Image: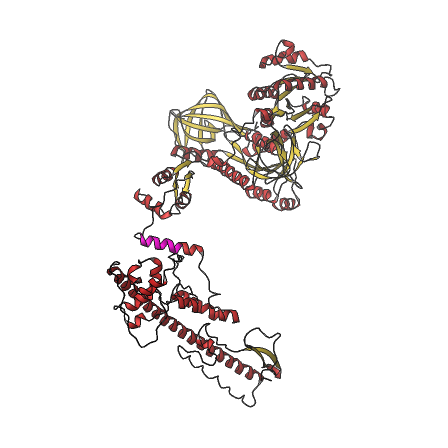
Amino acid sequence: MSETDNKPTLGRKPLGLKRSVEAGEVKQTFSHGRTNKVVVEVKRRKLIGKPGSEAVAEAPAPAPVAAPAPAAPPPPVRKPAPAGETPQERVARLQREAEDDRMRLAEESRRREQDERARAIEDEKRRAEENRANETRRVEEEAAAAAAPAEDAAPAPQVETDEPAAPPATEATEATAASPAVPAEAATPVPAPRRFTPVQRPETRRPEPAAPAAAVAAAPAVAPAAAPASSNAGNVARKPDAVKKSAAAPARPSSGGDRDRKNVDNRRQSGKLTVSRALNEDEGARARSLAALKRAREKERRAHFGGSSQPREKQVRDVVVPEAITVQELANRMAEKGADLVKALFKMGMMVTVNQTIDQDTAELLVTEFGHNLQRVSESDVDIDTSIDVDAEETLKPRPPVVTIMGHVDHGKTSLLDALRGTDVVRGEAGGITQHMGAYQIKTKGGDLVTFLDTPGHAAFTQMRMRGANVTDIVVLVVAADDGIMPQTVEAIRHTKAAGVPMIVAINKIDKHEANPQKVRERLLEHEVVVEEMSGDVQDVEVSAKTGAGLDDLIEKILLQAELLELRANPDREAEATVIEAKLDKGKGPLATVLVNRGTLKVGDILVVGTESGRVRAMLDDKGRQVKEAPPSLPVEVLGLGGVPMAGDMLTVVDSEQRAREVSAYRQEQATARRTATAPASLDTMFSALAAKQNVIEYPIVIKADVQGSVEAINNALHALSNDEIKVRILHSGVGAITETDVTLASASGAPIVGFNVRPNAKAREQIEKSKTPMMYYDVIYELTAEVAKQMAGIWGPERIETVVGRAEVKQVFPAGKRDKAAGLLVVEGFIRKGLAARLTRNDVIVSATTIASLRRFKDDVDEVRAGLECGVVLADTNDIRAGDHLEVFEISHRDRTIG
């Protein structure tokens, strides 16, 4: 048994020629007297010679050593543990010894690496010297072969040696031996260094035809003169012992000293030495990639042709240039270097950097100079332009008509729509008047669909009526038979004519005994509306929303007018819609009631609405039912917007969220620029603005409403209350409940909060109680405007009225006491009373405004002096009185102001 059989091993024995891993035990000592035994691996260094060498072939002979290995330093001597050592001291001592061992091993590793690096450098120098010697020998051989003519070739003299006759050698070997210029030591076959030069492609040597044996025996030494200096012959001449080398060991590629050193490091740092790795040294070496070979060949070709490659053909690009672009971004689009563009700009006299922004004209000069094509674009190209997107004629299909009901307030518009739909919308409206814009779709008895838009009739909702006329196909003008033509009726006629849509006149409330439909038709002639009964082209129908009379005739006339219009749209495309109304719901978030113009709006579509973007999460019809698709002319309520859009905005479906955010950001920038745009300032405008600011009283207010249309109407109505002396300043207006932010803004500015069909939330109510912010709640718009006008009049103050009661002329001035002066007057007109206000004028120019402090007739104090009498007065706060001046006496009265 061997001595290793008694030692414990770790698992299965490793494969190899000899066991290189053995097991041992290490005893660990811890504090408080605890110990532990750990099984560790013990590796022995294995020395394996190269295959084919004598050291491997002749087992007893030891392998030659190139350089003596540095002697390993003796292991450190461990001092015995001192007597009475505590566990803490023992741990500290062991830690110091472990640190010393680590430092010693690190120093040994560093020394070994230095020695190996020095040996590698020596090997590299030796290989370089051998390469130079081989190159010199090859050049001399080629020169000698070129000097000897081929036709004068003669057998070379044989060199007599004491060595035994060698077997027949190659032609290159005999030429090398016969050349007298090559020294003897150079003629000895030296194996070429195992280097890899990938520049030249290896060529396959073709077999030559066999020559007769007699010719070979007769002229064994004529080959050097007869054979041309071909590539294969040159290779054989450079390697005279190539056959022996190929038989002994294959040539090993190498790329230089750096790669040899890397291979040495890789071998040293690699894992466990195996039998295959020991026998095949070059198997684990990293091979060069195909790209590296191509680069090396290209480099060799450039060096061969004078160091410069053929000029490449310049690629012309179409460069998109916006209104402003940085130099680096322009260079990226042109595929040019940024430094080249900066250099070109420097030549133009512009000292810029690559991160500086240049305008479109400068970018055009650069693009033209570098030989590219320019494509100008503007920032507005980001926006969506639907005017150029026209549907083909074959894609259009019939769609339901959109009918807007318009007219004066309280003429029965919503009641008429309720009678058509079979609902009761009027009951839900405050004050019995419509203050919101509604959209509904009904199905007639014949199965036809008709979409109705209901607009408010109050004067404040002008924008709503105009918006309804712009998105509609047919306008139904509702006129009460007992009331006739009213201001909002005239306004509706104007909006209809401006939109260019056909009109149907519905004369309502014919069930009343005072109804007079003929008078309505006659009054319509004043506004150039001629109905059919009066030989015109405008249809009219007498209806009653209360009894239902004439409703079928109204539906029939609407369908007839729609048939004449031939309403069609393309449903098989991305949807486009118009926002009818928008609001902020507490549970659903931003909501928008939209009317689809063309295309089909589907759940999941990505859309842009004005300055807002989002995705359609759900859609509800006019009855609150969820729908998956909305074809043309169908009004739906859309959920999923990022914010509350403006009423009248266009809804457009886009292909990606990135496109939607891009368009939304551009529109927000444009809206901000329009809101913050100011006129060019001058001295005149600055002084006039300062004077106006000092003289005008501002009434700040915060407005919150339930829908966007109501906010718009309230803003317009309040702005109409402003005049030259007092104006409304709307600090904030929005949709939704009153929040803490609104209360904070109002309390900081001392402004009241107006809530139209909304109330504050719980936290806002607490803050209102703390800050004592005034609140005003309304559900009827004319009550809101009347109360705001009343408060504005109170802030403005009562109106001051001056009434002239008398005039007098100063005849003489007398001293009155030490400081004052008395004026002797002749009352010319009216009367003069003590305590009244007066103005002293001189040459029709006011000298001072004062009051009459004292009034005397002769020596008696009197209260009043009539015209034609003389008196003496003492004026308050002035002594600048001269004979010939005039005194104007007037009374001041106040009365409450009214606004609107």
Residue at 60% across, 43% down: 743
Which residue is at the front of the view, 252 or 656? 252
Magenta highlight on residue 301: yes
Q: Quadrant of residue 606?
A: top right
Residue 120 seen by the camera = yes
Which residue is at the front of the view, 832 or 117? 117
Q: Which residues are magenta?
A: 295-310
Q: Residue furthest right?
A: 547
Q: Residue furthest front?
A: 214
Count of marks placed on residues: 0
Residue at 31% across, 70% down: 187
Q: Is residue 124 above or below residue 719?
A: below
Q: Quadrant of residue 570?
A: top right
- In the image: residue 728, left or right of residue 371: right
Percent of width and height locating residue 278: 49, 71
- In the image: residue 712, left or right of residue 559: left
Q: Is residue 568 above or below residue 58?
A: above
Q: Is residue 202 above or below residue 677?
A: below
Q: Main secondary structure of the magenta part?
A: helix
Q: Residue furthest top?
A: 535
Q: Quadrant of the C terminus?
A: top right
Q: Quadrant of the N terminus?
A: bottom right
Q: Residue furthest bottom?
A: 83
Q: Quadrant of residue 596?
A: top right
- In the image: residue 643, left or right of residue 263: right
Percent of width and height locating residue 574: 59, 33
Percent of width and height locating residue 349: 30, 43
Which residue is at the front of the view, 642 or 815? 642
Magenta highlight on residue 238: no
Q: Is residue 130 above or below residue 204?
A: below
Residue 817 seen by the camera = no
Percent of width and height locating residue 697: 51, 34
